[in-house]
Every structure is written in structure tokens, then in C-alpha cells.
Amino acid sequence: MSGKVTAGARVGKLGRYEVLNELGKGAMGVVYLAKDPVIGRLVAIKTIKTSQSDDDDSESREFRERFVREAQTAGILSHPNIVTIHDIGEDTDSRASFIAMEYIEGRNLKSLITEKNKFSWDEIADLIAQIGEALDYAHRKGIIHRDIKPANIILTTDGKVKITDFGIAKVASSNLTTTGQFLGTPNYMSPEQVSGAPVDGRSDIFSLGVVLYELLTNRKPFQGDNLTAISYKIVHEDFTPPAELSSEVPPEFNPIVARAMAKDPWNRYQRGKDMALALYQLKAHLEEQKALQDLGTMVSAAENLPTLKLANLQELAAQGAPRETTPTPAPPPQASSMPPPPSPPAAAGAPYDAARGGEATIRSEVSHDDEMTTAAPNLEAAMEASSPGAPFGEGTDPERLPLPLPPLPPPPVRGGAAGAPQDWKKVAKAEVNPRWFWIVSAAALGILLAVIGIFVLRAKSVSKPSVEPDAAMEQDVRDRRQALEDGKKLFSAGKYEESLAKFRQVLSRSPNNQEARQYAQMAENAVKTKQDEEQRKSQATQMVEAARTALNEGRNDEALAKAGEILTVDGANADAIAIRDEASRKIAEAKVADEAAKRKNAKAKEAQAAKLKPTAAPAPSTAAHAAPAPAPATAATSSAAATTATLRVVFDSPFPEGHIMLAVNDQILLRKPFNFKKNESRSVVANVTVNPGQSVIKAWLSGPDMPSAFATTDTRISGGDSKTLRLEFGGGKLSAHIQ
């Protein structure tokens, strides 16, 4: 069951895929969850709108061819952070072009940002770094995304990042522009995209910088009331650094965002891996800071734990410890008129404690040296002298009682005691031997003078330079600093050749200058990229002249082939696009004219045959001519055999792994990956069935360890013939020869 891909209609099948349900809609089409009945794999199918009408006009046919070409090119990408393209096709009933991709369970960044999901700073750095590595891989394959934004970045359930819609943005944007629509908003576009200038991989770097900015601040760097205002800000105005919008954002992100979103492509990161490296380094720095912060928290918590200090010990000693044996309670005093025994006399100089009476001499003290002394043994001796059980003073001669010990001196109290001033007065009044006074004074004065002399001599020796200053060396240092600053200014202004000369001048005098070495490397990369770009443009200009000459001379097929070659070198070359469109139009007109002429000739022949047709012959004559009837069938069989031809493709690969794609008259007929084992013959052989006639053959070669290469040739193949196309790779170029 097949259903037409229209709004509100239920789709049963798209091509061979069984549609399960609808996943979402966008400006480019509808996304379905489908199942491949052959291997039972779930896929995500994205349909692409071709035109507003259902007419199979030349514009729709051209779009479908371009869609196939771009999707086939993107199909060679195989990276863990890029959604894999499995298949492309066109539904016969709905006439909708579609692409079958890897089905990913997860959510895109747009929905996560909308729901205010908070990422940690190191998670943001790691996420954008993964995308940068994926873009670097695609750019090395010669493929530019052109539509990097949160909606095209998927975060899977296991924490991986995937980029989707590779190979679709270029085709879809050109198609939708022709119908008066605008593909999304320009918030994530680079200045060269907004202004319509040619773009390369650095445009994706700018868009990735905008995504990083939005993850850090939860807002877009360029905002406006309409598309015109947003586009103007992207091209002409600077954005506010993320750390200035929020103090929580680490300021180390500012230089990375600023370089990724530079207006001039030459001032950006030239490759995605350069941006990824900077983010990975920042992630390591943030993780180190976090680890140090956690360590500081642990140390602070340990320092705040309660400790047993000397003051606590003194407090416990003052309170006293419980005895192991309970003392025998003293008998209650008897009611008598006997006065209490007299208190022992206090020692001279010791004040009497009236509040504690006679107990003042039987106290225990704890000194500040943590030594505890007690007068309790004297009390026990006094108790033994009396008869057991008798009250104090009865049956005992008071004169025979041992005299109590004098009270212990009070412990010194920190901060001064009451008796301290008296000691100082005694010391002040004491006589000092004059001889000792003068000896000590003279010794102190001698030591002071010796110390002063040492400091004076050292100050003189330090202030006097050991080596005379070298004016030439100082001037050389100043010159190097000035040259480095001049080089930085020239680099910022986009004058990379002049800045490289300055940095090399600094390195010739100071080879270990790391800052000059870093800027020299950046300038060399910028100069090389600029030279490559100029070389490609020069090559494209020469090829444009040849294509225009072929078009003017009526060699439309050759002009179309040369325009395709130009667009592989410079995808945004306006002259090549115009030549391609004009050649395609003339070829289509020629085909229409040929078909009309054929129909006219056929009608003329039928009319002529009708005029010359004889009258009906007698029955015997009809029977006599019945035998040769099978002859037309034989002719038809030979005619059917002559409607096709065979093209044998042979390629001796110098690489162990790669991919070959072949197109005949802009129709892709072969996609053959190869992966040879060690010591295995590296010959790629394939047979392709083609239509007879003039054929323009294009071949693409790509792989992980080789640069992408392109070759084209043309030939005329007759029906039933077989020819060999031999591909050869050498000197970084691919060549094609017909044998």
C-alpha cells in the first residue's frame, strides 16, 4: 500500500520501506519512522519537497538529479558523530524524493535548550569538540554542511552527539529559494552565507560558534525584530562576549567563541579539529579547577573538626575525677557547746580564704604545666592520729597532731596575676653591678654595629652591576617585541603574508619564542589556505572559458560536463551554474525537437504507407505469404538486444580502502566501496549497463587516506557494444580513459 506524501495523509510505504509513523515536519519535508522489510532495520526517512506543483517539469527533474548527486556524495561519510545515510530514492506514487538515514533515539539540542536544560561547562566543551571533529572529517571529504544549528544536532540516550542532514541543506536551500520560501532563520548563518558569497568549511565553524554561544548563555548572539535586522548584525556588528552576559560563564570561553565567530573567515579556526583541540584543552583545565576546588573543600572540612586542647584538659582537671572507692562519711556533729577546733595558722604571706575556712589548706591545684599536686595525704595522716570513729578533738591531744603543711603557692595566671607587680618592684629596687651593665651594653652595641656594616656592604655590592649593560642586546630585545606586536596587528588586519614575515623575523633572532612560533603557524595556515583558494578560483576561471566556448559552438554535452567539473572545484561559481543551466536547457530543447521530428517522420511514413497499401489479395495469395510471418519477431529481438551497451570499469587502486562513484549522462549508475586485505590484489572491476549513444562519463574517487578526486571523459557507444573504462590515480589526480 502506498500513500501520497501530503499533509494529513497517512503514508503506508515509501519505495520499499514500510512507514510506521510520522516523527516530525519541517520546512524541507516530513520525517517518518520506517522499516526496511529486507533486513528488518528501522530507518528515519526524510522526504524532500521538489516543487509546489505536481507537474513533472524540467525544474523538478533537475532538482531530483541534483538531490541524488548531493545525497550520494554525503553517503560516503562514515563517522561516529554523523548520522549515516543508508539509501535514497523516489516514491513512484507520490513522486516525492526521500532519503533513508540511520534512526537515532534521542533529542535534538533545540528542544533541550528550549526546555532550559542546564549543561555543565566541561560537558558543553566536550559536546562542541565532538561536533568540531565530525565537521573536520566531513570537510576533509570535501563536504560542507551549510546548516549547522541545534535542530540538526542530536544528543543520543547514551550521551553521544550526532549531526544530521549532511548533503541536504545545499539542495533544499536552492530548491526552496526558487519557490519563494526561506529555509529557517539566519541566526546561525555565517556572514558569507548571508551576503551570498562562496562558502567553505569555515562557514560551518562560524555556525558551530553560534551554537556554542547559545549553550553558554541560553540566547542567540545576533537578535532582531526581522530577518533584515538579524542579517545586518551578523555581517556588521559584534556580539557581547558570553562571560560579560553572565558571570557564571568561565572567561576562558571568550577567546574560543570570538575566534570561531570572526567576521573574516581567515581569522577563524581554519579546521574543525583546531577548535576541538582548544575545547578539549579548556575541558581539561576546567576539570582540574574542579578537582582542586573539591580538594580545598575537603581540607577546609578537616580543619573545622573539634580538637582536644589544653584548656579542655585543665577544665576536666578542675572539675575532678570520681574516686573508685567511696569515702567513709564523717559522723554527724554532736550537739555540744564545744567550739570547733581552731584553724591552723596560715603561713606568712598567704591570704586566708574566709569563704572556705580551714579547707583553704587542703585544696588541690592544677598548674599550667599540667602537673597536679594535692595536700590530701596530710589530711589522712591527721585523721589516723585520732581514734577511729571519734569526733575531731576527742581522745586526742591537740598538741600531738601534726601541723598542717603550708598552702601551695597559687599557679601563675596568664595575662598577669595580682602578685606580679610586687615582684617587678623588687627587681626594680635591686642593685645592679655597674661592671656587668657596661659589659652587656658594649657587647650589644658591637653586635648592632656589625649587623649595620654587613647590610651596608651588601647593599653596595648589589647596587653595583657585575656586568656592564649591553646596549645592542637591549635594542635587539626591543626590536623583537616591536616586530611581534606589528605581526599581531597585521594578522588581525588579514595581511597574513606580511605578518608571517614579521613572525619569522622574530624567530630568526629568538627561535624559542613560543608566542611568535604559534602566530607564525597560524599565519602559514592562513596563507596556504588563501593560496589554495586562489588556485582553485584560477583553475575554475580557465575551465569556465572552455565551457563557454563549447556552449557557444553548440557542443552542449561537453559544456554540461565541463560545468560539472567546475562546480566540483568551486561549488558556488555563478558562471558555471549559468553555463550548466543553459546547456541543460538546450539539451532538453534538442531532445524535444528530436522527438517531435521523429513523430512527424513516423506520421509521414504511415501516411505514405497507407497510400501505397495494395488492395486485399485473394485467399491463396494470402496463404502463400503466411510462411515468412516470424521474420518481424526476429528483427524485434535483435532490435531489443541492440538498445543497451555494457561499460566495464577497471581501477587498480593504490589505496587499500576507498569508494568509487560513476555517473553516465548525470545519472549515477555505480557506487562501489572497496576494502582490500593485506597482500590482496587491489583491482576493482565492475560492469555497468548503459544506453547507446553519446555518453558523458564522470567518476569520483574518495577514501579515508586519500584526497577526493574527480575525472570525466566522453565516448559514443553503439547498441550491443562493450567498452572498458580504465581509471588511474597518480600525482593526486584521477584520470579516465576509454578502451
Image (cartoon, grey):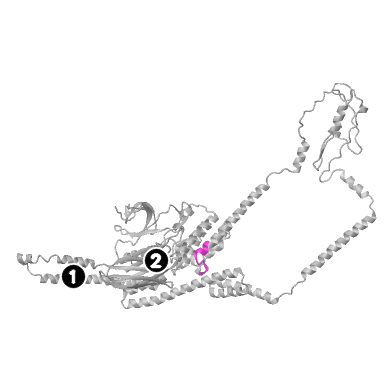
Where in the figure is residue 723, as x and y percent of width and height?
A: 30, 70
Going by the picture, which residue comes out furthest to the front?
679
The image's mark for residue 602 is 1
- Residue 625 appears in the rendering: yes
Quadrant hosting residue 636: bottom left
Kindly state the secondary structure of the residue where label 2 is placed: loop
- Residue occupied by mark 2: 682
Residue 274 is one of the magenta-drawn residues:
yes
Q: Residue at x 49, y 72 (%)?
A: 530
Q: Which residues are magenta?
A: 266-276
Q: Is residue 129 above or below residue 550?
A: above
Tell me the mark number nearer the camera, choosing from 2 and 1: 2
Where in the figure is residue 163, as x and y percent of width and height?
A: 45, 58
Quadrant hosting residue 311: top right
Residue nearest the viewer, comparing 428 with 539: 539
Q: Is residue 426 above or below residue 641?
A: above
Q: Is residue 259 above or below residue 159?
A: below
Kindly state the secondary structure of the residue where label 1 is placed: helix
Give the Cα distance between marks 2 and 1. Answer: 51 Å
- Left/right placement of residue 107 relative to residue 96 reads right
- Left/right placement of residue 227 relative to residue 301 reads left
